[in-house]
Amino acid sequence: MKQVERVLRKKRGDGKAVLIVDDNPGVRLAVSQAFLLDGFSVCGEATNGREAIELTKQLIPDLIILDLSMPVMNGLQAAPELRKIAPTTPIILLTFYGSEVVAGQASKIGADLVLSKTEALFSVVNKAHSLVGD
Amino acid sequence: MSAEELKYPEWQCPLQEAILEFRPQELFAKVHRAEAAIFERFQALSSSGDHHKERDALSDALSTLRVLKRDTLAFPDWNG
């Protein structure tokens, strides 16, 4: 039974590469740990939209977790550029200010999903699994 | 206001420190600390449907941090 669980667990996430973009080191750490614990790998971390664009060019991640409020270039400014570089990579806008970003605005800028940082991280990771086809 | 007088000191203390900071470099770190404490608290509350007053206070705190980041730290803002 334990072996079966281990196999099932390994399949979920399947080491898919996530790029975490958030200027706050404490939030980055918590989000990274939640994804790592559920079968993803974290291929990179960026502290603003501009860094995210550079890393996306280099790494072509399977999933991008993008904060909204960041210095230099925020999530709304970065998302259209990220979408151009990695057209098939799902982008989740993970923010405290999600209620201010209407769904239409999110799809217009290239984000697949807007989730709130007030939501439990396991729920965020579950939705990420659905987006990457797990 | 001292920690004893604050209703939710675990995240209101770092918030207060950020509000009272005027040096940009120190403010940046203090905003991060306050935001991380708020994030941690929201995560702790995520399994509970209660604590409505604290949730409202947390939302107000986020509005304050947004203003600090936009007006003092020159973060690019968005509409809304």
Image: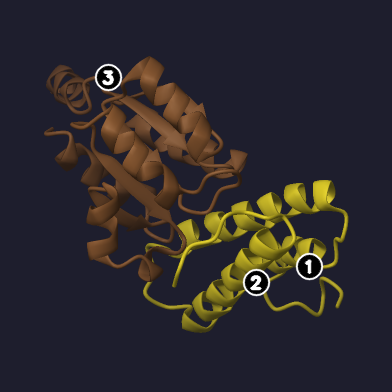
Q: Would you say the residues marked 2 and 1 are in contact, meaning their CB atoms lie under 8 Å apart?
A: yes
Chain A on-screen colour: brown
The chain under label 1 reads B
Residue at (31% x, 24% y) in the render = A61
Image quadrant in which you'd find residue A97: bottom left
Task: Classify A1 as above or below B14.
Answer: above
The residue that disc 2 covers is B64
Earlier along the polypeptide chain: callout 2 or callout 1?
A: 1
On the picture, is A4 further left or further right than A49?
left
Which quarter of the image is occupied by the C terminus of chain A?
Answer: top left
Secondary element at image label 1: helix
Task: Classify A29 as above or below A7.
Answer: below
Which chain is yellow in the rendering?
B
View extreme (bottom): residue? B53
Residue A39, given in percent of the width and then of the height, sits at 28, 26
Number of numbered discs overlaid on the protein picture = 3
Few, some or many residues within 10 Å of mark 3 (<14, 14–19, 20+): some
Label of residue A15 in the image: 3
**Colour scheme shown:** by chain
Secondary element at image label 3: loop
Few, some or many residues within 10 Å of mark 2 (<14, 14–19, 20+): some
The chain under label 2 reads B
The residue that disc 1 covers is B19
Residue A18, given in percent of the width and then of the height, sits at 35, 28
Q: Amino acid at mark 2?
A: Thr
**For discs 3 and 1, the disc positioned in front in the rendered view:** 1
